[in-house]
Image (cartoon, grey):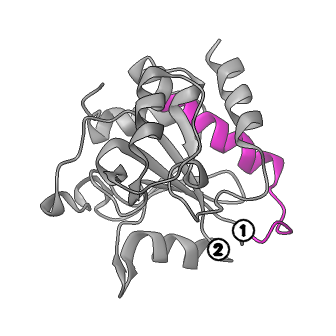
């Protein structure tokens, strides 16, 4: 269990991991904290955006849409590997998920199947949206996958977590399929190796 890092430490951790970071507007104070608590944090959640074009993707993830106000994550990982910071604090990315999955993340154990939605994930997870159509055909450039690995590892390194603290939205909330196009087990292996 960890308190969320400060926005400055978040930025520093990403840069220290070798990422190119783009700061978007008032990202440090753009959040949904008025809707509920932010923290304690237990892990990192990965998503795909179902969008095309970095500028539009960043705009949607920052502002949200009528049914779901932004920010929709903390950072957008673009196809070119840059990380665009769009919010910090509580963000509308995880939604309700499985409490058994959360317990496994906290214990850094193998994830059970997600079969219920009874726990507020927006409170407990950092979120990265990754620019991809999520159709299983849109490619994941090597530079983007490396940025996903580095971003997740940066937060794990700061909090003293290992790779089991990184999950996909599809592993948290029944019915979700993101991120589609790469293996979460393979990504966790990459993150584990980076942390070593």
Q: Residue furthest bottom?
A: 66
Answer with left or right where residue 58 lies relative to residue 125: right
189 and 146: which is toward the camera: 189
87 and 137: which is toward the camera: 137
Is any atom of residue 195 visible in this view? yes
Please identify the quarter of the rendering in which residue 117 is found: bottom left
Q: Position of residue 193 (x, y in %)?
A: 71, 19
Q: Position of residue 118 (x, y in %)?
A: 34, 54
7 and 66: which is toward the camera: 66
Estimate how packed mark 2 is, as few (under 14), some (14 to 19) or many (20 or more) residues with alpha carbons within 10 Å.
Answer: some
Write the start and end of the magenta stretch as one range: 135-155
| Image disc number at residue 50 | 2
Answer with left or right where residue 64 lies relative to residue 186: left
Identify the residue at horizontal 28%, vertical 62% (top origin). Answer: 26
Q: Are marks 2 and 1 in contact (CB under 8 Å)?
A: yes
Q: Position of residue 2 (x, y in %)?
A: 29, 26
Identify the residue at horizontal 66%, vertical 36% (top origin). Answer: 149
Estimate how packed mark 1 is, as few (under 14), some (14 to 19) or many (20 or more) residues with alpha carbons within 10 Å.
Answer: many
Q: Earlier in the sequence, mark 2 or mark 1?
A: 2
| Image disc number at residue 100 | none
Is any atom of residue 15 visible in this view? no
Q: CA distance from mark 2 to mark 1?
A: 5 Å
Please tell me whether residue 152 belongs to the stretch shown in magenta: yes
- Location of mark 1 (residue): 134
Please identify the quarter of the rendering in which residue 125 is found: top left
């Amino acid at each position: 269990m960890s308190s969320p890092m400060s926005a400055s430490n978040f930025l520093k951790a990403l840069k220290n991991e070798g990422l190119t970071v783009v700061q978007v507007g008032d990202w440090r104070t753009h959040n949904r904290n008025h809707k509920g608590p932010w923290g304690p944090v237990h892990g990192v959640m990965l998503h795909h955006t179902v969008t095309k074009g970095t500028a539009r993707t960043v705009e949607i993830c920052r502002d949200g849409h009528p049914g779901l106000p932004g920010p929709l994550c903390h950072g957008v990982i673009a196809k070119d590997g840059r990380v665009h910071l769009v919010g910090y604090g509580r963000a509308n990315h995880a939604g309700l998920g499985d409490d058994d999955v959360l317990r496994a993340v906290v214990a850094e154990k193998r994830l059970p199947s997600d079969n219920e939605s009874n726990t507020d994930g927006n409170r407990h997870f950092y979120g990265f949206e990754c620019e991809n159509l999520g159709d299983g055909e849109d490619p994941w450039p090597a530079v983007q996958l490396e940025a996903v690995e580095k971003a997740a590892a940066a937060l794990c390194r700061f909090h003293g977590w290992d790779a089991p603290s990184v999950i996909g939205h599809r592993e948290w909330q029944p019915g979700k399929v993101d991120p589609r196009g790469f293996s979460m087990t393979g990504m966790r292996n990459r993150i584990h190796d980076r942390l070593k």
